[in-house]
């Protein structure tokens, strides 16, 4: 199921959420580059400014917060913390298979939540 259009959409939104979550966390000017190599900002000597994904990322964060705790935790481990998949699974207290199953379930639920948010429906 990973690799389908819906999963790619969810992973793209989560990638943008990760950029937003880390935006401005390091002191001094720095270049922020998306995974495809596109320079997001700033160039040498410029201020970092506002994240270009801020509005979408805030909505994504609200959707992540609406997930059940085990799914929310696996998304946070996957996108915000470093390490191997095994290390991330161990930090969550599960094995790699369980980690991947939770990640799959989280992607499916997030897609539903993104659709609900787009339709201005409650996130529950």
Image (cartoon, grey):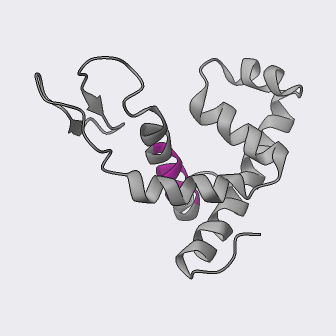
Residue 71, given in percent of the width and then of the height, sits at: 78, 47
Q: Nearer the viewer, residue 67 or 7?
A: 67
Left or right: residue 18 compared with residue 124:
left
Question: What span is in magenta?
Answer: 7-15
Residue at 39% of width from left, 52% of height from top?
Answer: 54
Q: Main secondary structure of the magenta part?
A: helix
Q: How many marks?
A: 0
Magenta stretch: includes residue 14: yes
Residue at 29% of width from left, 33% of height from top?
Answer: 33
Residue at 66% of width from left, 53% of height from top?
Answer: 64
- Residue 1 appears in the picture as rendered: no
- Residue 85 appears in the picture as rendered: yes
Residue 120, given in percent of the width and then of the height, sits at: 58, 80
Q: Quadrant of the N terminus?
A: bottom right
Left or right: residue 26 compared with residue 30:
right
Question: Which quadrant holds residue 70?
Answer: top right
User: Is 76 above or below relative to 119?
Assistant: above
Left or right: residue 102 compared with residue 6:
right
Residue 61, given in percent of the width and then of the height, sits at: 58, 52
Residue at 24% of width from left, 39% of height from top?
Answer: 49
Question: Which quadrant holds residue 108?
Answer: bottom right
């Amino acid at each position: 199921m990973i690799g389908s259009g819906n999963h790619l959409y969810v992973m793209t939104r989560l990638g943008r959420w990760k950029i937003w979550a880390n935006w401005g966390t390091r002191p001094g000017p720095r270049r922020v580059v998306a995974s495809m190599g596109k320079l997001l900002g700033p160039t040498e000597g410029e201020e970092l400014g506002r994240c270009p994904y801020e509005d979408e990322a805030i909505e994504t964060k609200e959707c992540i917060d609406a997930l059940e705790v085990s799914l929310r935790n696996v998304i946070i481990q996957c996108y915000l913390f470093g390490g191997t998949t095994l290390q991330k699974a161990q930090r969550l207290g599960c094995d790699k298979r369980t980690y991947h199953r939770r990640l799959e379930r989280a992607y499916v639920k997030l897609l539903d939540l993104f659709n609900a948010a787009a339709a201005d429906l409650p996130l529950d």
